[in-house]
């Protein structure tokens, strides 16, 4: 009996040991601490259908609902609309927010994922910005010559009910509730599909709406021009009553200091011949006809030796040369007492078919050179400007600004044998901008005379390829010469995929961003000067390049 009891106890002990062993080997169950939900993300980009917004987000299984906020000022103030919903695909419309969204208006959307326990809600996620579609309309968009400082031409396709009224609203009055002015449309004007409205304020944006029997047929945004020149002012030389091509030359022969010469719209004037010695503004008159005033050059303009001129301004005119191999706006070669233009400005101009815009030699100087809101093309072997005399104190352009303008088919931008003080390029479009054998920025004065002292800044711009003028098959550019000690700052500036700089000529940090397609994919017709954005997927479409070509938010 003793032996039987001994052998019976052993299996029991062995099994108990195994149970203990296996139980001690089991992994301890891990309890994870609950954390905040991730921010929601989109499946597809925000889009719009008429005046509704379509949102398609990835579903989050831990979220019980989503709180959306809608803004029109990037959430600088309280959201316009806030609502909570449990779906990730939704259409934001009147049924959801209680009123119609505005047509042709930009909205920003952000969302927070809601957890069962509020302490674990996600952080707000900004989903982006989207613009609703324009109101389906018979109204036509304004052309460049459909607006002045105080007038606007309103146009439409005359079908359906007759248009009988035009109303003007502030651009902040998106619901078109409080008209600033109202204009009756006659039967004849309706048939013609246009009416001229007046008493507008200069440099002001408006929403201009058309109506039939009280029903809205469409609305379009207009912006009036800055205040124009009054022909009767004592400092104005009024040439708008004459179509004589020689009238500008005659006027400039005896012009007074600080005068404004007002040119007639649609008339071509010959370039002045007398040496300039006074400050002058040459301005095209406003009007609702397509053709602007033109100045036609078969030579170049000179400055009297030893004078200092405060300003020379060309405003709202076309400057056309007879030969891109021989003609300039200014070709100044004065020795001795310095000859100085303090401010040379081209504003709202088209400049074309010149050998160069400004060429300086000897003791000739431009302190501030500005091109703004202009289009420059077909410029020959002296570029936008050239200083052409060696020596530390010789011909120079000190401060250069190229702003909100388009440049294409240029031999180069700048050549200088002396230092410049600053160079700013902002909001510009460049295509076919350097010819083979040339340099885009050529500072060639040698040691201590081949830099931009205050630096070169290129911002908010878009660049394409070089100019294959000789049809050699190469569009590579030599981007710089000199500038070895120049600080270069490149901000929000794109180049197309076919941009190429010759080895050793690269600008540091250029481009800041590269578009994946070619220039011909990005722009509608670049060789013919149409730089409207053709690729809706271009990330810089609303913020880079000449603003006239940007996609409006």
Image: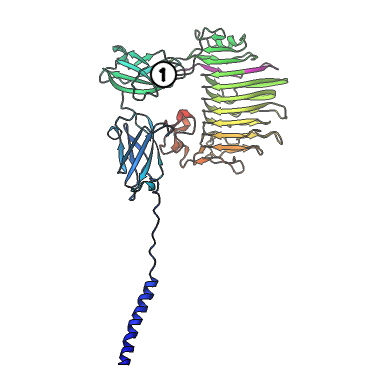
Is residue 299 located in the magenta-colored stretch of the structure? yes
Q: Residue furthest right?
A: 336
Q: Check disc 1: other Cα within 10 Å, few if <14, some if 14-19, many if 20+.
A: some
Whole-percent x, y for residue 290 in the image: 44, 18
The residue to which callout 1 is attached is 146
Q: Residue at x 35, y 37 (%)?
A: 47
- Position of 427 with respect to 395 (left or right) is left
- Occupied quadrant, residue 434: top right
Please tell me whether residue 79 is drawn above or below residue 164 in the rendered image. below
**Res 157 → quadrant:** top left
Who is closer to the viewer here, 218 or 54? 54
Magenta span: chief secondary structure: loop
Residue located 62% across and 27% down the image = 399
Report the residue at 38% width, 45% height from top: 41
Find residue 128 and report its horizontal and vertical position in percent: 40, 38
Residue 14 x/y as whole percent: 35, 81
Which quadrant is the N terminus positioned in?
bottom left
Question: Range of the magenta residues?
Answer: 289-310
> In this view of the protein, can residue 393 be seen by the observer?
yes
Looking at the rendered structure, the secondary structure element under dot 1 is helix
């Amino acid at each position: 009996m003793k032996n039987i009891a001994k052998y019976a106890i052993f299996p029991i002990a062995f099994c108990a040991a195994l149970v203990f062993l296996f139980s001690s080997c089991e992994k301890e169950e891990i309890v994870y601490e609950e954390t905040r939900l991730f921010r929601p993300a989109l499946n597809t980009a925000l889009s719009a259908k008429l005046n509704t917004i379509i949102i398609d987000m990835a579903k989050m299984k831990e979220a019980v609902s989503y709180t959306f906020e809608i803004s029109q000022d990037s959430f600088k103030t309280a959201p316009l609309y806030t609502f909570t919903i449990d779906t990730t695909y939704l259409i934001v419309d009147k049924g959801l927010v209680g009123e119609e969204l505005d047509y042709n208006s930009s909205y920003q959307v952000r969302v927070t994922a809601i957890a069962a326990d509020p302490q674990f809600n996600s952080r707000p996620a900004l989903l982006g910005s989207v613009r609703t579609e324009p109101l389906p309309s018979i109204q036509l968009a304004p052309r460049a010559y459909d607006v002045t400082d105080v007038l606007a031409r309103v146009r439409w396709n005359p079908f359906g009910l007759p248009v009988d009224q035009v109303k003007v609203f502030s651009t902040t009055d998106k619901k078109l509730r409080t008209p600033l002015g109202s204009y009756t449309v006659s039967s004849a004007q309706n048939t013609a599909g246009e009416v001229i409205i007046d008493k507008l304020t200069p440099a002001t944006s408006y929403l201009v709406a058309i109506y039939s029997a009280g029903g809205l047929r469409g609305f379009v945004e207009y912006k009036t021009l800055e205040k124009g020149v009054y022909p009767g002012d004592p400092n104005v030389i009024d040439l708008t009553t004459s179509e004589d091509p020689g009238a500008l030359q005659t006027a400039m022969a005896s012009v007074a200091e600080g005068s404004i010469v007002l040119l007639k719209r649609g008339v071509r004037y010959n370039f002045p011949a007398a040496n300039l010695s006074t400050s002058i503004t040459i301005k095209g008159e406003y009007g609702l006809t397509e053709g602007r005033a033109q100045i036609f050059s078969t030579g170049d303009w000179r400055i009297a030796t030893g004078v200092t001129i405060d300003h020379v301004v060309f405003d709202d005119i076309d400057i056309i040369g007879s030969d891109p191999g021989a003609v300039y706006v200014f070709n100044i070669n004065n020795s001795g007492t310095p000859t100085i233009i303090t401010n040379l400005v081209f504003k709202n101009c088209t400049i074309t078919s010149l050998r160069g815009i400004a060429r300086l030699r000897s003791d000739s100087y431009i302190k501030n050179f500005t091109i703004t809101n202009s289009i420059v093309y077909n410029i020959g072997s002296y570029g936008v400007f050239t200083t052409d005399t060696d020596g530390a104190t010789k011909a120079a352009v000190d401060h250069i600004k190229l702003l909100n303008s388009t440049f294409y088919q240029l031999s180069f931008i700048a050549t200088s044998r002396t230092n410049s003080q600053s160079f700013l390029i902002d909001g510009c479009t460049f295509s076919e901008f350097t010819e083979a054998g040339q340099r885009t920025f050529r500072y060639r004065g040698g040691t201590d005379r081949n830099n931009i002292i205050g630096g070169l800044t290129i911002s908010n711009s878009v660049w394409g390829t070089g100019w294959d003028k000789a049809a050699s098959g190469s569009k590579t550019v030599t981007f710089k010469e000199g500038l070895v000690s120049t600080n270069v700052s490149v901000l929000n500036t794109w180049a197309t995929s076919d941009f190429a700089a010759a080895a050793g000529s690269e600008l540091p940090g250029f481009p800041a961003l590269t578009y994946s397609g070619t220039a011909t994919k990005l722009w509608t017709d670049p060789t013919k000067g149409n730089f409207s954005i053709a690729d809706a997927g271009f990330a810089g479409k609303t913020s880079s390049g000449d603003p006239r070509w940007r996609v409006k938010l």
